[in-house]
Amino acid sequence: MSLISALARLEAVQTGRAQPAATARHRHLSDRPLVLVPLTTAGEAGAPLGALVGTDRDAPRLLVVPQPRDRDLRFAFLAELADVVLPYIDTYAEAAESAERNETDPETGKRVKVEVELCSDAPQLIVPSRAGVDYVRLLGRSMRFRRTAEQEPEAPHPAPPRVPLLGRWLTHYGERARVPGSSLLLALTEVLSRHWATGQSSLEDQHLGALLAWIDPPDGTSGAEAALSAELARDERGQLRCPPAGPATDPAFDNKLLAPAIERYDRARTRLAAAEDGLQADDRLAELTAAEHGIRALVESRTRPTWDAVWRGIDLLRALPEGAHVADRWTRDRWSFTGHRDRVTAGEPPQPRHDDAVTAANKLATREREQARLEAQEALDDPLIMAGRRLAGEAFAGEVIDVVMAYSDSKRPSPRPLVTVRTEDRPHLGERTKVYRQLGGKPQAAEFVRYEGQEGAGALFVLRILDKMGRGKEPEAGSVPEKGDHVCFTLFEHEQRGGAKLPDPEETPWTHGGPPGERTESPLPDPVTEEDAL
Amino acid sequence: MTTTFTGTPDAPGVFDPGAEATRATDAILRDTLHGPERGVVVDSPPGAGKSTLVVRAALELASAGRPLMVIAQTNAQVDDLVLRLAEKDPTLPVGRLHSSDPDPYDKALDDLDNVRTSAKAAELAGLDVVVSTAAKWAHVKVDEPWRHAIVDEAYQMRSDALLAVAGLFERALFVGDPGQLDPFAIVGSEQWAGLSYDPSASAVTTLLAHNPDLPQHRLPVSWRLPASAAPLVSDAFYPYTPFRSGTGPGDRRLDFAVASDGGGPDRVIDEAARSGWGLLELPERHTPRTDPEAVRAVAQVVRRLLDRAGAATSERSPEPVPLTADRIAVGTAHRDQAAAVRAALTDLGVTDVTVDTANRLQGREYDVTVVLHPLSGRPDATAFHLETGRLCVLASRHRHACIVVCRAGVPALLDDHPSTEPVQLGVNVKFPDGWEAHHAVLSQLSEHRVTWRP
């Protein structure tokens, strides 16, 4: 934990309210996000119990699996989910603009500009918590290798149409969520705790109810009290007043309410199957329907509070102004979305179970680059985050108190002005440490020359400006700080260099096992439970 | 490397470090030059002559008419290798491939007649040996791969970095220290844990997962660590691949001309001079990372080391060598701690002492090291602070003595925080774990404890 976040958490404890950790919103928020609140069944991985899903906060769609162990009912649930999610995705897949992209020409090997389509906006999926993101990934994995009756008429357990496609999209979203700063799939607790520091541990921050209680406690209570009651308060039936955001449910709910309801449903189903005549069947169907409604009501009662909490969290975030670089990162998300849209349209097979060596290395390199980019951009967009970096000695702000013109030693001398900055920050500057500041949206580099002692409460640092001053002998107007200017330099770079190009997967070297070989269209199902293709 | 033969290799019970090391080196060179396998892996404990081996292998390959590329991890390592190569054989044509940044290499290379530097691989074509960093090699394209490569510090190289350069060579000698810090990624990489080519694993892990039959060798003797340190480091960090020190108990000595003033720093310096280890224990307290008292204590120890006119006696020279600032280093876990120590040293008028994090001290060697214990003053013990390699680096940089500055209460802290890292299927569990290694080192250090209330 950085010093500034420790301080913010202490202040939160003292004041009883979460303290701002950012003054801008650093994640993109769609005007029409699709919120998904899934619940899972205890004891079986990837067996959904139900979900609330939709784009309208007042009219979520309730999906329920009355008997989660029944694979047919599970498929019906997934088909319904596909009916909600895929049309939402389709509306964004259709609207595209033209854009340019650098590609390597396969014949000449040169980098050339190619005109391609870029979707004007992308669908955004919001789940309550990190566990929800993992669940989206799990659902994706359980669906994308399924075969529909159309694809494989002979195979047993065919999936409903569009379910494999939903699996591929959820897989893509789950994978994209691992890229730092991406916003295609957001876990609300993560976004909220990026922007507010509470007086509890970061582990406790993963409880959406408790987190919101700290950020926005009900009138007359402190955040600590409200968070405690969100975590522990139970009603007269022993049920949590603020149900966990899922996908896991509270054991007390499972044992006392859900299990009897499912048992009632199972009994009703058996009785219906054993009905001897039409009249009896009608009666027993009514029983079954009533039992199913009972389960639906239970699932809704556990998901609706979370659903409302998610929208409340979105409201809180919307009140913050968007950070300057957020749109830039959202464009990358749009590229990611467009790329997957094109792969689906081109009829490519689903994402493989495991990445090959080259894909894994490329993904890791991308994510490391995005992480560094995110950290730099958040600091540049937000004085409060920059304050944290300054406190950590990774940046400093101050006033220019002297500028002396100087030139480089080369044959054609270029300007290398020496700028003296007075700052009360304590940056970790060493000999020739490079520092950067923003100049017209681009980073300008300087290097640390010497320390010139204290002046009042501030230290004097001499910097040599190195670039962005034009090609002439005299620096361009405005490209060198002037006496009296307030400047902020960072010790970290603002932009990330691209890494080296890795070999193509077919060229994987012997140290990494050689080329991965042919990709099978769909891997074999689990040998024990053949209806599972995980 | 000077060696004295004090026994015959065949005599049971008598360990002859020189002969043991020669035998290991010969076997490595035989496999490298004449073996049928595409790769040879050499594990080297701290200060076991890894660089000497790399230089020797490069010279032998070159003299056999087999040009080679050498891959190191940092520019400092590359420059150091080039300097050593030129020192051993000034006539050998060596290429130093460098980046196009300003000041990409050590200016000392410009004075060497047969070393050519360039940012373009094509300009170095035809030279016997070309040396560069893995990051730079990754941008090089060749029509015909090199027949040979040497990969230095291969345990600190990430698997994805090897993937980027492995197409450049046909066969390679991989040399490194498995006990030092593992490479790391700044983002999570659990999704690939257990895959043989996990991009965040070390290059050697991936190499051996795919080529399990490659010959693996081990250098058995540490020439850096004194007889007082080798058993501890070997037991704590290399329990299954033990090594010995090349020198005996009486071969190294540290003396101070100025007598002790009786203060904590002086007492711990005397203890370390006598036994090779010293623990300066400050009162128990939870502190921020840059604990001002501990940082000041580190600086004071360094100041006193210099003030007391130390002299180091070793097998390197017949006369004692003065203990100067460039022979002392301070090691910390975090960069802000290093910065704080640097500032404290400046306040005491000390400027030329190296202060760095464990990551940056890897591969370096000093007479005396002063270490700020990674767990000092912490309320918790995270995986970062428990990492075996971090402690191993900090405890194995010295030729004479190592002084650790720490707050009391770390053993209790360790007991409160047993390792709880999730176990991943398909990942080899590393032994020893950091928790155990920390306990082993602390129990040894506690015998050299000097308690002090600054």
Image (cartoon, coloured by chain):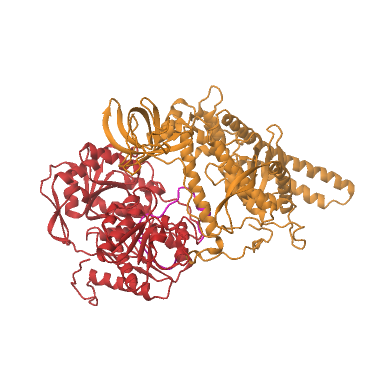
- Horizontal side, residue B300 vs residue A375: left or right: left
Which of B123 and A466 lies nearest the eye of the viewer? B123
Is B174 part of what is drawn in magenta? yes
On the image, the x and y values in percent for residue B129 come to 35, 65
For chain A, give the colour: orange
Residue A248 visible, this angle? no
On the image, the x and y values in percent for residue B78 come to 34, 57
- Which of the 4 image quadrants contains residue B148? bottom left
Check the picture and name the quadrant holding the N terminus of chain B. bottom left
- Which of the 4 image quadrants contains residue B316? bottom left
Which of B406 and B163 lies nearest the eye of the viewer? B163
On the image, the x and y values in percent for residue B169 come to 44, 66
- Horizontal side, residue A31 vs residue A365: left or right: right
- Horizontal side, residue A466 vs residue A250: left or right: left
Check the picture and name the quadrant holding the C terminus of chain B. top left
On the image, the x and y values in percent for residue A415 come to 36, 37
Is A81 part of what is drawn in magenta? no
The chain painted red is B
- Horizontal side, residue B41 vs residue B401: left or right: right
Which of B62 and A393 lies nearest the eye of the viewer? B62
Please tell me whether residue B30 is drawn above or below residue B77 in the rendered image.
Answer: below
**In the image, farthest residue toward the right:** A278
Give the residues drawn in magenta, as a range.
Answer: B169-195
